[in-house]
Amino acid sequence: MEYFPNLPSEHFANPGAWAATMQAQGWHGVCASDHLMIGANQYPHVFVTAMAMAAATTSIKITTSFANNLFRSPVEFAQAAIALQTFSGGRFEAGLGAGWAEQEIRAMGMDYPEPGVRVSMYVEALQIAASLLHSGQCRFDGRYYQVDIAGEIAIGPLADKPPPLIASAGGPRAIREVTPLVDRVEIKASARSTRGGALDMATMATVTEEEVITNVNRVKAISADKPLGIFILVGAGEGAGVSALQKAMGNGYLGQFVGHPQAVANNLAQLSGLGIDRVQLTELVPGSHTALAEFLL
């Protein structure tokens, strides 16, 4: 099992130093989210952050978790991914997500698409990105994107090996349509909790193990050998923050990833039994990554 901690907000000012610490602790990779702001948190640009983490490390993988498709063209995403793959020495993995946070899209003066449109845009963007990552070229005439990078023109220069393309999906349609397009699928266990445009903890507390298993099986039915990851929000420790989070999560399936570090680590390890080989860990309680490192690595 691989474990990738996601850059916590308290380290936004120095992602390179944080990534170097994660490498020293023995984590398999690190990742960064793509937002302008979520609540009071102001995020550094995801591609600049990924480059800082790549420059400060030598062996661990670097990925975007996930670049926001609503922010930019899939052509720009592919261009950045190609550059990051080259500059990292082949350690970058290109994670592209559909985007979900309404606040930041409205703040940018953009329209916020309804869920079905976001998925449709996402599927088109992944097709474009996949072509560009492998060849530097793409001709595409879709409903939402029109791209004509062909003939004598191309983006690049291409890396020796294209970065793997990763999708994040949590609904049946998204899983069905994106799985054939990418190298890896990450199951977003909390997808229902962000579908309305903001994080809804009450909805997150209702996620069941059956939902996760169903989504794993949906991917496997399409591509039995497709590598599978999962997005998990964690709170590891024994302080007041963990206790409050445990109360909010109730008896829901995702509540098992909040609590004493050893218990959380044991529950994370059990995910391998579902066919999952990578877990992306986003802290809901500061210090959770370090607390878990002793038991996971």
Image: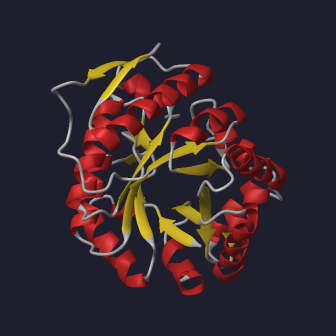
In the figure, 25 relative to 180: above or below? below
Q: Nearer the viewer, residue 288 or 26?
A: 26
Evaluate whether residue 204 shows in this view: yes
Q: Write down the quadrant of residue 179 in the picture.
A: top right
The reply, left or right, for residue 215 in relation to residue 49 is: right
Q: How many marks?
A: 0
In the figure, 248 relative to 80: above or below? below
Across and down, in percent, residue 295 comes to 60, 85
Across and down, in percent, residue 140 comes to 38, 20
Across and down, in percent, residue 190 comes to 66, 47
Residue at 25% in and 40% down: 79
Evaluate whether residue 7 shows in this view: no
Residue at 58% in and 64% down: 279
Residue furthest to the bottom in view is 294
Residue furthest to the front in view is 151
Residue at 55% in and 44% down: 168
Q: Write down the quadrant of residue 117 in the picture.
A: top right
Q: Nearer the viewer, residue 123 or 245?
A: 123
Q: Nearer the viewer, residue 243 or 67?
A: 67
